[in-house]
Image (spheres, helix red, strand yellow):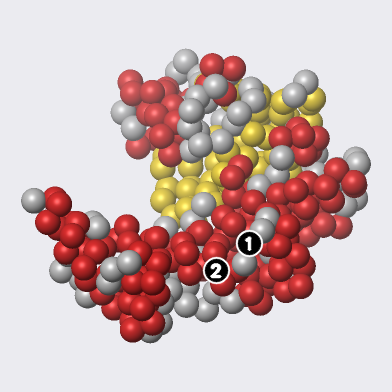
Amino acid sequence: MTTVWKAAEAPAAERAAAVREAVGTRVVRVDIDLPDDPRDIQVELTLSDAGPVQVLTVRSMATTVTRSPRLAREAAEPQLFLTLQGSGESAMAQHGRHARLRSGQFAVYTTTTPYTLMFDHGLDAHFFRIPLAELALPEPALREVSARPLGAGNPVAELTAAYLRRIADSPDLRSRAVAASLAQPTIDLVRVALLSSMADPSMGKESMQTTLELRLFEYLRTHLGDHDLTAAKIAAAHHISVRHLYTVLARASVSLGDWLRTHRLEACRRELAQPHARDRTIASIAHQWGFADATHFSRVFRETYGMTPRDWRAAKIRKAR
């Protein structure tokens, strides 16, 4: 879903506060330099959310945006922001580096470290917000690529810039139905673009390997209830071979089938204990968590926990009374 917010729609006396509130609650908490005269405050935000990815287009008067040390210490979920410059130029600073962005270039920065964004001639840019947990890159790699102009001269970064601009400029691609399916490919492409832009390629290679196990298990937890969760699908989602998938899991002493069965059973056990699930059938709960055969589910549940799913739920209901 895409929403448009315009400062001009706020009462003049409340306009500055409205801008700060809109950005702080919908995007990220930052300090924003605004004109003293409300008539000069010209800000338009176009926001689209697709799963974990937020796409934000901003057009405004000249301004400076700062994420102070105090705000950087906030407990909110750490995020990576990517600024894709539209017309004109802008500048940013983080980790003691300064980057000047020209049209078509992009740069990234994180909310966990102070930064400054400078739009001396007005703001015309697209911003992509991605949780750092979804990006799954270690801090040294993020520090290496932050506040550096990316795009020109790197084929992967150029491809990424063109792809992101296409998404941001197309209302159809920003619609919820389409954008949700593009969220994971967008995250993957941004990750590859950042790694390909590192001065030390070995750091990028090492980063991808060290975070692969983390990304695999996060993917398994997210898709635990999927009935088509096969080794081939998991491997394809991470751009690795099935053989390499099993190698990574073996290093973690994990059997894919056993891991899925154990975590699906535990999810079912938790669901059966919930008051809101008392009127649901055992089969529907089993199906929700990836078990296609209710009879098979009941058998393995009893083998694992020593009682049937029905007896487990009945025991929890008695205990709650």
Residue at x-position 38% and y-position 23%: 17
Q: Is residue 3 above or below residue 306?
A: above
Image location of residue 134, percent across then percent down: 59, 50
Three-letter amino acid code of the residue under disc 2: Asp
Distance (Cα) linking label 2 and label 1: 8 Å
Q: Give the mark count.
A: 2
Disc 2 residue crowd, few under 14, some 14–19, many 20+, Cα 10 Å: few
Q: Quadrant of residue 149?
A: top right
Q: Amino acid at mark 1?
A: Val
What's the residue at 38%, 72% (across, down)? 303
Quadrant of image for the N terminus: bottom left
Q: Secondary structure at mark 2?
A: helix
* Residue nearer the viewer, 260 or 94: 260
State left or right for residue 85 relative to residue 283: right
Query: In the rendering, which numbered label is found on residue 82?
Result: none
- In the rendered view, does 286 fall on the left or right side of 176? left
Q: Residue furthest left?
A: 321
Label 2 close to label 1 by CB (< 8 Å): yes
- Image disc number at residue 254: 1
Q: Nearer the viewer, residue 293 or 33?
A: 293
Label 1, residues with CA under 10 Å away: few <14, some 14-19, many ≥20: few
Residue at position x 35%, y 37% in the image: 9
- Residue 40 coordinates in the image, percent (x, y): 49, 25
Q: Is residue 172 visible?
A: no
Circle 2 is placed at which residue position?
A: 258
Q: Nearer the viewer, residue 172 or 228?
A: 228
In the rendered image, residue 56, in percent from the top left (x then y), is placed at 54, 46
Q: Residue at x 21, y 64 (%)?
A: 313
Residue 247: in sight, yes or no? yes
SS assignment at label 1: loop
Residue 37 horizontal/vertical position (percent): 45, 18
